Image (cartoon, rainbow, N blue to C red):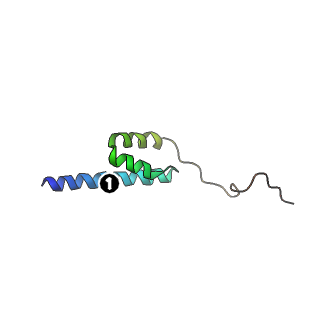
């Protein structure tokens, strides 16, 4: 019975780390770092995720944003 409880807790922890990583990848951060922090340093990892998740994700790049601003067409 105690192995089953340990397995459920481990799967929940891995699931939480995946959720954190995907969320931070979507926000433009390195999600792998947050997943590792949540897996190995649970309170610190969740605190990092909570503080960084408060910031809004970056706006998507518009058409022409990648262009060189110094280029002048003829």
Q: Position of residue 37 (x, y in %)?
A: 38, 46
Residue at image coords 32%, 54%: 14
Q: Label 1 neighbourhood size at 10 Å, few (<14), some (14-19), many (20+)?
A: some
Q: Is mark 1 on a helix, strand or loop?
A: helix
> Along the line of sight, which residue is nearer the eye, 49 or 37?
37
Q: Total label count?
A: 1
Left or right of 58 on screen, residue 33? left
> Along the line of sight, which residue is nearer the eye, 41 or 27?
41
Left or right of 2 on screen, residue 24? right
Q: Position of residue 38 (x, y in %)?
A: 36, 47
Write down the quadrant of residue 3 in the picture: bottom left
Q: Position of residue 2 (x, y in %)?
A: 14, 52
Residue sitting farthest toward the right? 74
Residue at image coords 12%, 55%: 1
Residue at image coords 52%, 44%: 56
Q: Position of residue 10 (x, y in %)?
A: 26, 53
Residue sitting farthest toward the bottom? 74
Quarter placement of the C terminus: bottom right
Left or right of 14 on screen, residue 27? right
Residue at image coords 38%, 43%: 45
Q: For mark 1, what is the residue?
A: 14
């Amino acid at each position: 019975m105690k192995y089953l409880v340990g397995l459920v807790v481990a799967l929940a922890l891995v699931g939480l780390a995946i959720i954190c990583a995907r969320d931070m990848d979507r926000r433009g951060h390195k999600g792998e770092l947050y997943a590792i922090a949540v897996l190995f340093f649970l309170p610190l990892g969740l605190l990092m995720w909570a503080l960084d998740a408060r910031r809004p994700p970056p706006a998507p790049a518009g058409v022409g944003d990648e262009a060189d601003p110094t280029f002048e067409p003829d």
